[in-house]
Amino acid sequence: MRKTVVIYFLIPFLLLSLSGCVPLIIGAAAGGLGAYAVSRDTVQGETDKSYASLWNAALAISRMRGVIKQEDNTRGYIELETESSQVWIRLVRLTRATTRLNVSARKYHLPNMTLAQEIFVKIMEEAK
């Protein structure tokens, strides 16, 4: 009887913990970078590659993949449309040596994690 009560008490917590986003690691594909999913449509990671290098790589990949709707180098923001999806790329300087790359993608207002991962990896591979 006591075990049954404990199990019924723990089941909701177990279900809540399983329903969220499971961290995603893209380490090997991005050259040793530890990337992770921060939401259902966003991949993010920190790197020691320069901001300028990442910005140039993000612009090049964006131009190859689709149509850039907005870009702002000072804010580190690119918005593009590709494969019927909206993609947002954000660069944030954390320190002089560290930059955070954040890629979000949505298709018909639904998360498109595959595209976000693909663009993230391409940018990291392209950056020098």
Image (cartoon, rainbow, N blue to C red):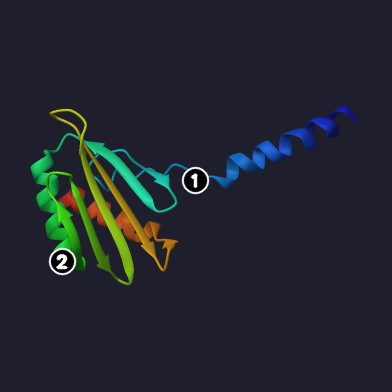
The answer to whether residue 101 shows anywhere in this view is yes
Where, quadrant-wise, is the C terminus in this rendering?
A: top left
- Residue in view at x 25 percent, y 36 percent: 46
Element under disc 1: loop
Element under disc 2: helix
Dot 2 corresponds to which residue? 64
Badge 2 amino acid: Met
Q: Position of residue 20 (x, y in %)?
A: 54, 45
- Residue in view at x 16 percent, y 56 percent: 71
- Farthest bottom residue in view: 84
Pick whichever, 14 or 73, lies toward us.
73
Where, quadrant-wise, is the N terminus in this rendering?
A: top right
Q: How far apart in space, not on screen, are marks 1 and 2 (Cα)?
A: 30 Å
Question: Is residue 44 positioned above or below 108 on the image?
Answer: above
Dot 1 corresponds to which residue? 21
- The answer to which image quadrant residue 100 occupies is top left
Pick whichever, 90 or 122, lies toward us.
90
Pick whichever, 32 or 128, lies toward us.
128
